[in-house]
Image (tube, helix red, strand yellow):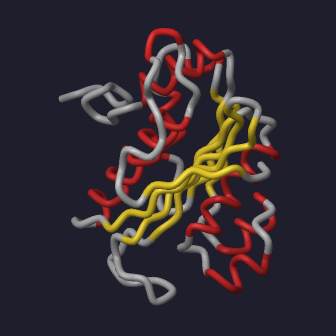
Amino acid sequence: MTPAGSRASVPGAPEVVGRLRALGATVATAESLTGGLVCAALVGVPGASTVVRGGVVAYAPEVKHEALGVPAEVVRRHGTVSRECAEAMAAGASRMLHADWAVATTGVAGPDPSEGRPVGTVHVAVCGHRDGEHITAHRALRLQGDRAQIRTASVSAALRLLHDTLPPTLSDRGCTVGDHPGETARSTSC
C-alpha cells in the first residue's frame, strides 16, 4: 500500500510543494466535490507547512458565497458547476487566506447529475500572480468512473493545473499553461 500524499497516490503534490517552496510562495485551496482532498494531498508532503495557508471546503452554494465571496450572481447565472464559480472560488480562497496562489475544485461526483450537468463534469481553477500579472487558469473535465474515482481524478487535475500554472523555477524552465485540451489561462483580477 502506498502512503497517502505520496507521488504514487496523488501525482503532483510533491512537485507542487517543491515548486512553491522554491518560489517562496503560499497556496490555499477552495474545494467542493473534493471535500478537502486537495489540501490533504498538499499537507501530506513533508515541508508543506511552509507553503500551505489553509483550505475551505465549500460544498453548499451558500457557503461558496458566504465563506469565499463567490458572487450570488455567478451562482444564479452559471451555477456552482461552472468555470465562473471555480474561478471565483480560487480568487476568494486567495483573498480570504492571504495566499499567493489558490486552487479550486467544483463539479459533480455522482451518483446523480446536479444542476443539469452529468456526473463527471468538473471544473478546476487556479488564481495567482505570474510575471507581474494576475493569472487565472481553468480546466474543464469530463471524467468517467464512480464517485471515488471522479474525486481522485479531480484532485490530480487540480494539482497538475496548479503545477503547470506556477512560474517555472530555475530547475524546471519551460513549463507552461496551454499544453492540455480544455485549459486556458488569462489575465484577470485575483
In the rendered view, would you say 89 is above or below 142? above
Quadrant, the N terminus:
top left
Q: Nearer the viewer, residue 93 or 137?
A: 137
Where residue 31 appears, as percent x and y from the top left, is 57, 54
**Figure label count:** 0
Q: Nearer the viewer, residue 130 or 92?
A: 130
Where residue 32 appears, as percent x and y from the top left, is 55, 61
Q: Please report the residue visible at 54 percent of the width from the left and 39 percent of the height from the top.
A: 39
Give the left or right position of residue 7, taking residue 23 as reference.
left
In the rendered view, would you say 38 is above or below 105? above
Q: Nearer the viewer, residue 87 or 150?
A: 87
Where residue 141 appears, as percent x and y from the top left, is 38, 63
Give the left or right position of residue 113, taking residue 21 as reference.
left
In the rendered view, would you say 27 is above or below 63? above
In the rendered view, would you say 34 is above or below 113? above
Give the left or right position of residue 2, taking residue 87 as reference.
left
Question: As drawn, which residue projects farthest toward the bottom?
Answer: 116
Q: Please report the residue visible at 32 percent of the width from the left and 77 percent of the height from the top.
A: 111
Q: Please report the residue visible at 56 percent of the width from the left and 53 percent of the height from the top.
A: 125
Q: Please report the residue visible at 78 percent of the width from the left and 40 percent of the height from the top.
A: 97
Where residue 43 appears, as percent x and y from the top left, is 52, 28
